Amino acid sequence: MNCWLALQRLADNFGMNQHKYFELKLVDTPGTATQSVVAPQFALRPVPAESDADLKIIPVQVMPNTSEQRFFLFGQGKQIGVINHARTNPNH
Amino acid sequence: MSAPSLIPTELAVPQLSAEVFSIPQGENRYLIYAPLRRTAFVANARLVNFLADLKEGRYDKAADPEGVVIDFLRQVAIVDSGPETLPVSTLSGAPLPTAITLLLTTACNLRCNYCYASAGETALKFMSLETAKRGIDFIAANAAKKNFIAKYAGQPGVTEIHVAYHGGGEPTAHWSVLTESFAYAQQKAQAIGLRVKGNMTSNGVLRDDKKIDWIIANLDKVMISFDGLPTIQDKQRLTAGGRGSSEAVMQTLRRFDAANYPYTLRITATEAFLEQLPEAVAFIGEHFKPQSIHVEPAYLIGRGQQAPSANTTRFISAYRAARAVATKQGLTLEYSPARLDRRSNHFCGITQDAFSLSADGNVSACYSSFSEADKLADVFFYGKPDSQGYVFDMPALEKLRNWAVRHQEFCDGCFAKWHCAGDCHYNTLSVSDRSKFTGSERCHITRELTQDELLARIAAAGGQFWHESA
């Protein structure tokens, strides 16, 4: 299976529609438009992990019927292991 | 003979093989982006920490007992995919440009209230045809030289030379040298078996169908400054006589469209009219057929220096709304530093030996620094004519080359750095300390709009992750 097909299958099996979506609040990147002299710090580093035990990818959808494309919907996320299991289990 | 490795492959620690950024989205969500792997997805904090461990050479096997996360990360080239290829090109030695920008004149038929060049207030200058020819001779000779070397190296050579026309004033205000210099470039190119690619940035106020038709017949592409709504255009982009310019520009655009001529539009967004940006884009979509629309907040230089800044969150909101309108109408809207399909070390030509001639014939790397009297001329002017062609100030040129984004420590931690590539240096230097690059107000806009595009691409790719093969 080529890489792209594998990725597509992985995506298909996330089952986006099963998720409950909620609206993303506008989150600006650090530094307002008038205070941008602080060097940006987005390099990968540890973050507080809160209560999540599983490694999850959070689904993203563009909010339907909005005039501004800024608004994205985020799902609750799903364990990648569950997703990969689903990939090999047609009854999942 | 070396002994075979006794370490089973599955026990080897997976290697993070990408520069990965983590952008907080609130509520335990992080946008993970590997720009050079063309991969993005939104992860929870636990997955961020899993990746951060990999970065430090630790593999939390207990968190991924079946190795499915690692398998996914391998497929999107974040793990075990070898070193990344940086989009970096380095120039050395004397410049050998095969492209030239002729800054024909400081004269302009408009008096736009945000003009970066303060056209109409600066000394009137007009380039001589001899000055233009000298520059064209130089790039044609360079093209011939490159092709000679390429021929014996068995490599592809250059097939065209590029001639562009730009401000400080309006290029078409110096019509005779515009047309004669281009004809000369065509002759020179033809003589060495090349073609000329021509383009121009213009205010579009031509009022002469013959001139418009010359552009259509000769230049490959033109960018026209047009603020979209006639009401806005006629307030911001007045003629030297104080009249509105919208009807003249629209006449030019209609003629371009009738000939299916490729052009782009540039909207300058000022603070006073930000709310009307979506309407301006809608108007363009209803009446004209540009290839794309470039939107930039008005630069805080020239006549715009004292104006209220449009580099604000209001601009971001207006741009988002305008982009939604553009998408519905099938138009492409662009803000120059936030182009997700560009991965580069260079925002523009200033770090790549761009060869622009002022009206007096001296060499500037930047067409915003169009005059020797410019306050940043000491930064951007790096050459002058001599009897052999041109003589270059190599230390000045090396400084310019080192403005490329990979040399900007300030940008190291920014996920947008390979897209904005350090943004417009003229703008940045105009508002910041020259001794140290610290970005500008535009950085925040760039990051927000880049982030939008990433989330939109994830959504469009099925909602889980976005990945494109290099």
Image: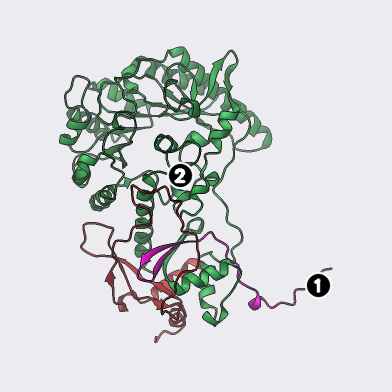
Where does label 2 land, which residue? B438
For this orientation, the residue located farthest to the right is B1
Q: Chain A is drawn in which colour?
A: red
For label 2, the SS is loop
Chain to which the residue tagged by mark 1 belongs: B
Expressed as whole percent of the image width and height from the top left, the position of residue B234 reads 17, 31
Expressed as whole percent of the image width and height from the top left, the position of residue B365 reads 48, 29
The answer to whether the residue labelled 2 contacts the one labelled 1, judged by CB atoms less than 8 Å apart, is no
Look at label 2 and name its amino acid: Thr
Chain letter tied to green: B
Look at label 1 and name its amino acid: Ala
Is residue B66 in the magenta section? no
Chain to which the residue tagged by mark 2 belongs: B
Choose between B32 and B343: the one closer to the eye.
B32
Q: Can residue B396 be seen in this view?
A: yes
Expressed as whole percent of the image width and height from the top left, the position of residue B299 reads 33, 36
When the figure is inspected, residue B156 is found, relative to residue B64, above or below; the finding is: above
- In which image quadrant can residue B208 be found? top left
Mark 2, mark 1: which one is toward the viewer?
Answer: 2
Label annotation for residue A79:
none
Is residue B15 in the magenta section? yes
Label annotation for residue B3:
1
State whether discs 2 and 1 lie on one chain: yes
Q: In which quarter of the image is the N terminus of chain B?
A: bottom right
Name the residue at 18% across, 22% down.
Answer: B242
Task: Using the numbered discs, state the Cα–Cα distance from disc 2 to disc 1 in whole angstroms.
Answer: 52 Å
**Magenta-colored span:** B4-32
